[in-house]
């Protein structure tokens, strides 16, 4: 008997293959290991290979800096959200406008 809903079966199969998304910390650690490996390749005698390693290091360093920056911003946001007490009144949604005499 044919599958009555092959689209859902394909979506489920694709989801199983993809796995769970990684965390920012996992990406940072992976990128750092890649940067260390690319740094080791800078010492290779082949100039073309060393040039590729320089490019990899520069691209990886920029990506690593962005990941670190995002992590720091998340920490700041969490700290700011933690500062606001539950007892405080929320900020007004906007200016209060009065019509006519009060």
Image (tube, rainbow, N blue to C red):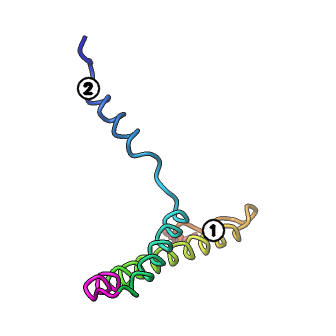
Which residue is at a point 40% across and 87% down the rendered structure image? 43
Across and down, in percent, residue 87 comes to 76, 62
Across and down, in percent, residue 14 comes to 34, 39
Per the picture, the main secondary structure of the magenta-coloured stretch is helix
Across and down, in percent, residue 12 comes to 36, 34
Does 101 sit above or below residue 61?
above
Residue nearest the viewer, comparing 39 with 93: 39
Which residue is at a point 25% across and 10% down the rendered structure image? 1
Left or right, 68 with respect to 7, comes to: right
Which residue is at a point 52% across and 64% down the rendered structure image? 24
Left or right, 5 with respect to 72, comes to: left
Give the quadrant of residue 38. Answer: bottom left
Stretch of the chain drawn in magenta: 45-54
> Which residue has dot 2 on it?
6
Neighbor class of circle 2 (other Cα within 10 Å; few <14, some 14-19, many 20+) is few
**Screen quadrant of the C terminus:** bottom right
Across and down, in percent, residue 68 comes to 52, 76
> Which residue has dot 1 on it?
78
Residue nearest the viewer, comparing 96 with 38: 38
């Amino acid at each position: 008997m044919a599958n009555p809903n092959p689209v859902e079966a394909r979506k489920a199969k694709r989801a199983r293959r993809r796995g769970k998304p990684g965390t920012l910390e996992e990406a940072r650690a992976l990128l750092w290991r890649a940067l260390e490996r690319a740094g080791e390749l800078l010492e290779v005698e082949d100039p073309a290979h060393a040039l590729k390693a320089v490019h990899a290091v520069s691209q990886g360093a920029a990506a690593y800096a962005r990941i670190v920056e995002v992590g720091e911003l998340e920490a700041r946001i969490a700290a700011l959200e933690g500062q606001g007490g539950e007892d405080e009144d929320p900020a007004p949604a906007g200016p209060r406008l009065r019509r006519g005499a009060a």
